[in-house]
Image (spheres, grey):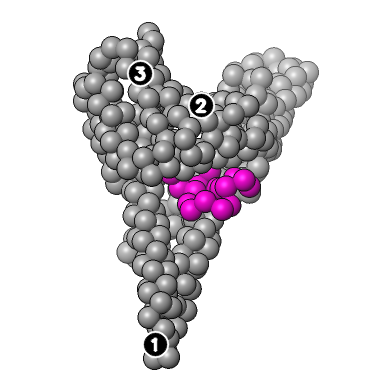
Amino acid sequence: MIKKIKNSKYRKKDTTKIISNLGNILNCVTILLCMGFNIIIFIKVKNYDIDIFIITLIFTVIILGTFYLQKIIFKNYMNDILTKLSDMLATISDMKEKEVFSIIDDSIFSKLQHQTLKLINILKSQNKKIEDEKNEIKSLISDIAHQLKTPLTNIKMYSEFLQNEDLSEEERKEFNQIVLLSLDKLCFLVESMIKMSRLESSVISLHKTKSNINEAVLSAITQLYKKAQIKNIKIEFEAKNDININYDKKWTTEALFNIIENAVKYSNQGSTIFISTEKYEMFTRIDIKDEGIGISEEEIPKIFMRFYRGQNVANEEGIGIGLYLSREIVSKQGGYIKVKSLKKGSIFSVFLPN
């Protein structure tokens, strides 16, 4: 391999030398031709006139001078072009959008510069994407560590308390209950994070099939019926017609479940949750209206962020993943979610493409 590289270098040097030698030979041939031309004139012209000789000699000098001048101009032009090409290539390593050649000229160099600037923009975009992914991973690790800290600390601390033989039966039951609740929270957290990471890394692919959207809504309501019953919350579902659209039933049920669960969690006892579906030309709309604590206007853009929890929900159990997952599931199907805050409660509107 080294021999091949050396040989290629030698070949380049030899090629340069041959071109230089050819140029020198061409100069010599031109000079000889001009001298020969003068000699022929000197021999052929019987009545030799010195003025003709001088004119011919001047003409020869002008030709040789023009040739030499053209060679110098061409050499300087090539040096200038090579310098500019070097500067243009340097912009790639420096990642700077610097115009070396004029963009007005329709030349091969301006076209080459355009492609170079295009490449720089692509590289910048890729670098930004890599940097954003690195920051996202850092943020995710920090969030996971923060969320896992509380249940793990509780499990460790109360497990140590349970080792004390002097505990009363009532205290033992209480500590056991706290350990079990922390384990439940830990399991829920891990399961949610697995779902989240699978969705983000596209490990889980959504399989859309033609089916009735009302079935997904009913499935989500059924799973939450017991929680709603405990708080004496009524869930009213108004399905006008059978709405058949292309969607992933399993994951859409998950998305609706998270939104309805939040409605149950943050609604007062004895209140009502209204759910309705309506089909438009391009999208099908699912409205989930509650009579809960509501959401402040400044918090609406933040509620779909991973691990975000509102200021007025600190007393409720939760880790802030549900709405984030719902938005990911809906957006991966080409849909979106709109939120409207009311004087009493809020409305979550899920739009899925037909």
Which residue, given by chain and number where applicable, does mark 3 sit on?
Answer: 238
Q: Amino acid at mark 1?
A: Gln
Evaluate whether residue 126 shows in this view: no
Neighbours of disc 2 within 10 Å: few (<14), some (14-19), many (20+): many
Q: Earlier in the sequence, mark 1 or mark 3?
A: 1
Answer whether labels 2 and 1 touch (C-beta < 8 Å).
no
Residue drawn at 28 percent across, 23 percent down: 214
Evaluate whether residue 244 shows in this view: yes
- Percent x, y of residue 331: 41, 31
Q: Amino acid at mark 2?
A: Ile
Residue drawn at 28 percent across, 29 percent down: 218
Q: Which is the main secondary structure of the residues drawn in magenta?
A: loop
Q: Amino acid at mark 3?
A: Glu
- Percent x, y of residue 208: 25, 28
Estimate the spatial distance between the alpha carbons at disc 1 and disc 3, rounded to whole Å. 54 Å
In this rendering, the answer to whether 217 lies above or below 27 is above
Which of the image's four quarters has the C terminus? top left
- Residue range corresponding to the magenta coloring: 304-322
Q: Secondary structure at mark 3?
A: strand
Which of the image's four quarters has the N terminus? bottom left
Q: Name the side, left or right, on which 254 lies relative to 344.
A: left
Looking at this view, name the residue that lies furthest to the top. 281
Neighbours of disc 3 within 10 Å: few (<14), some (14-19), many (20+): few
Which label was assigned to residue 296? none
Q: Earlier in the sequence, mark 2 or mark 3?
A: 3
